[in-house]
Amino acid sequence: MAKKKTVLFGQRKSRNFAFTLVDILISIFFFLFLIPFFLTLLQQTGNYLIKLIDYRAAYNRAFSVVSLLRYPIFYCGLGVPTDVDGYKQSFGNSRFQPFNWTGPVSVVKNPLGLENAELRIVFAKCDYKKLKSNFKYKEQGKVISFTKKIDKNTIVASNSGAPNNIKNCIVFRSSFPNANPLVVRWVSSDRYFLEVESYLNDEYFQLYKNDKMYLLSALKVFCKNAILYTNDYKISGDQPRVDGIQDIRFYLDNNKNFITIYILSRGKFQYNDYKKIIGIEKCFPELESEWSVIKSTYQLYVYKTVWRLPNCLSENLLFAKD
């Protein structure tokens, strides 16, 4: 009969403990071997997320500027002459802004003296008040009527002389001849009737039933102290609109049919060292040279957009021959 082998309880426990300890040591070794890779991956992921958040903040700022300018640019020059002489004549050569500007769109120096840094734009804003009937100037008098009451404070009558307030003027799409801004001389007490005059067509022009009235508006856009400002001539003073816009530049083509806008916006985070501008290669060489010397601890991004000015198309484009 075989003798049964006796295994002490303490010996078995000791052998199991030794095996578990080896497993732990091996696990620790692999963990120590892999931890630098995990830390590197974690750091890279964190840096990527920071850059993504930073870019998104800069993009949102630039997009706010674009959204602000989209409507004025699309309706720029609606109902007014685009040439300098015709534009000034249509407002009786008024000495007041924006009537003394060089047309419905122009680019000048900003208050800091930087070239191409201030946009001046005259546009029309639909008021959704419709003409009650067809109208022939002088043949039917000078008073036009509307199907709805005109809101208070949208129009201010200029009793005589050249207009001095942007609220003195209105335009209509259907006007014949076109590009014929009208100066309001009188507003009825019930606000259903307006007396109007035209400096360009003082003998005859025609308007058509159900055409909507457009209120003339004007806007200055420029950047100062990393803030985008506007002046819409209906509120006194300059109005801060978008924070974090380091600079903005505007470029018109020779016929003023297209406008190119460069926006230099900053991100959300501030770093310890100066950052190279991202997207600066999109700029004109002159602007690239000017912006490349800017030193900022914020990451700066260049956003570029090009828009057509549909109401400022020159005759060369409208009547081009093959």
Image: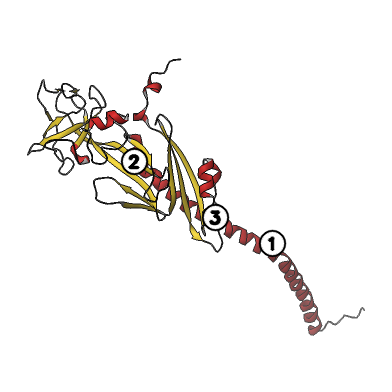
**If you read the primary sequence from the N terminus, does the residue marked by circle 2 or circle 3 appear first?**
3
Q: Residue at x 16, y 24 (%)?
A: 202
Three-letter code for the amino acid on which mark 1 is drawn: Phe
| SS type, badge 2 | strand
Q: Which residue is mark 3?
A: 51
Q: Are marks 3 and 1 in contact (CB under 8 Å)?
A: no
User: Residue 107 appears in which quarter of the rendering?
Assistant: top left
The one nearer the camera, 240 or 225, is 225
Distance, label 2 to label 1, CA atoms, is: 56 Å
Name the residue type under label 3: Lys
Q: Along the line of sight, which residue is nearer the eye, 125 or 105? A: 105
Which circle, 3 or 1, is nearer the viewer?
3
Residue of label 1: 37
Residue found at the far top of this picture: 322
Q: Earlier in the sequence, mark 2 or mark 1?
A: 1
Residue 13 point in image, percent of width and height:
77, 81
Q: Name the residue type under label 2.
A: Arg
- The part of the image, by quadrant, that contains residue 37 is bottom right
Return the mark for residue 120. 2
Find the residue positioned furthest to the right. Answer: 1
